[in-house]
Image (cartoon, grey):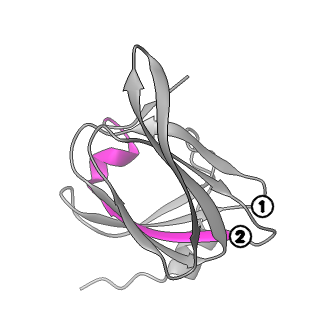
Amino acid sequence: MIISNINSCLNNTGTDEKAGVKLARLTGDEKTSVFAIEVGKEQSIPAHYHQEGIETYFILDGQGIVQTGALENGKVHWITEKQVIAGDCFAIYPDEVHSFKNSSEKTLRILGTSPLSHTNEDRYFIA
């Protein structure tokens, strides 16, 4: 068994090049991995989607805005925009375009699960 500490992992990781936020894999395998995500003040994760597998998110600290939508003719048609706060949990499904924005002065910390492929080959950002 390997034990990871969310604080140590986030402190020792850099910014994810494509998402623009701190993203640290804590544990898991290719099918299901657990990630810690840190979205700083005035930061956001751009609109993107994944073709396979669901993502689950648990808001640990801070608050943010999550948008979900669908890709239609190369453009995002936003369907929902929800405020999330510490303690909230939700899922994002395959082909569901989503984005996150920190909406507070505090760092937004998220614990998420997804297939490992969601951090590389199955991650499609919308220009």
Query: Is residue 30 or residue 74 the one in the foreground?
Result: 74
Decide whether residue 116 is among the magenta residues.
yes
Asked which secondary structure carries label 2, the reply is loop
Residue sitting farthest toward the front: 79
Q: State the quadrant of the C terminus.
A: top right
77 in relation to 20, above or below: above
The disc label shown at residue 41, or none: 1
Q: Give the range drawn in magenta.
A: 108-121
x 55%, y 38%: residue: 18
93 in relation to 113, above or below: above
x 58%, y 41%: residue: 17
Residue sitting farthest toward the right: 105
Residue 35: where, in percent of width, then height? Answer: 42, 66
74 in relation to 108, above or below: above
Amino acid type indicated by mark 1: Lys
Asked which secondary structure carries label 1, the reply is loop
- On screen, residue 36 versus residue 100, left or right, reads left
x 52%, y 37%: residue: 47
Query: Is residue 62 or residue 111 the one in the foreground?
Result: 62
User: Upstream in the sequence, badge 1 or badge 2?
Assistant: 1
Residue 104: where, in percent of width, then height? Answer: 76, 67
What residue is shown with label 2?
Answer: 107
Q: Distance between the residues labelled 1 and 2?
A: 6 Å
Amino acid type indicated by mark 2: Thr
x 43%, y 38%: residue: 69
